[in-house]
Amino acid sequence: QVQLVESGGGLVQAGGSLRLSCAVSGSIFSINDMGWYRQAPGKQRELVAVITSGGSPHYADSVKGRFTISRDNAKNTVYLQMNSLKPEDTAIYYCYADVKPYRGSYSYTKWGQGTQVTVSS
């Protein structure tokens, strides 16, 4: 069974930094895109950043220049380095991975449990 385990959330002051990690475990043949969404109270979940299997990153406009997504394919892990944090970055952050369980299968999206990031002003 495939699982995503997130870590690295917490409370930080505005202007500070946090690094989120998300490790994928279980029966996996390959992983395509990996990324992060976030959901603030009373708002819809929004895409923060995604990284392809080849390492190409894409970011939401709101985080460009402040956040960096990366992945370690040997460890099946995706990271989100968040710098210059703002109070509006406060949200639950969810990682996801498009997982192919075996050769020739379709891929499906698996989600992490979410980790709280709170930025105080």
Image (spheres, rainbow, N blue to C red):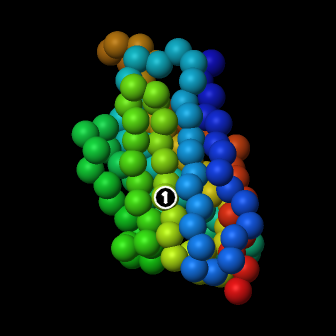
Quarter of the rendering containing residue 116: bottom right
x then y, percent, for residue 117: 69, 64
x then y, percent, for residue 95: 56, 47
**Which quarter of the figure is the C terminus placed in?**
bottom right
Q: Residues within 10 Å of mark 1 (few under 14, many from 20)?
A: some
Quarter of the rendering containing residue 49: bottom left
Look at mark 1 in the image and give the residue it sits on. 81
Q: Residue furthest bottom?
A: 121
Task: State the residue in front, 70 or 37.
Answer: 70
Looking at numbered disc 1 in the image, what kind of residue is underneath it? Gln
Left or right of residue 100, residue 118 in this image: right
- The residue shown at (46%, 28%) is 75
Left or right of residue 114, residue 75 in this image: left
* Up-down relation of residue 119 to residue 121 (above or below): above
- The residue shown at (47%, 19%) is 28
- The residue shown at (56%, 45%) is 21
* Up-down relation of residue 82 to residue 34 (above or below): below
**Which quarter of the figure is the N terminus placed in?**
top right
Task: State the residue in front, 10 or 36.
Answer: 10
- The residue shown at (43%, 72%) is 66
Task: State the residue in front, 82 or 111.
Answer: 82
Left or right of residue 43, residue 21 in this image: left
Quarter of the rendering containing residue 88: bottom right
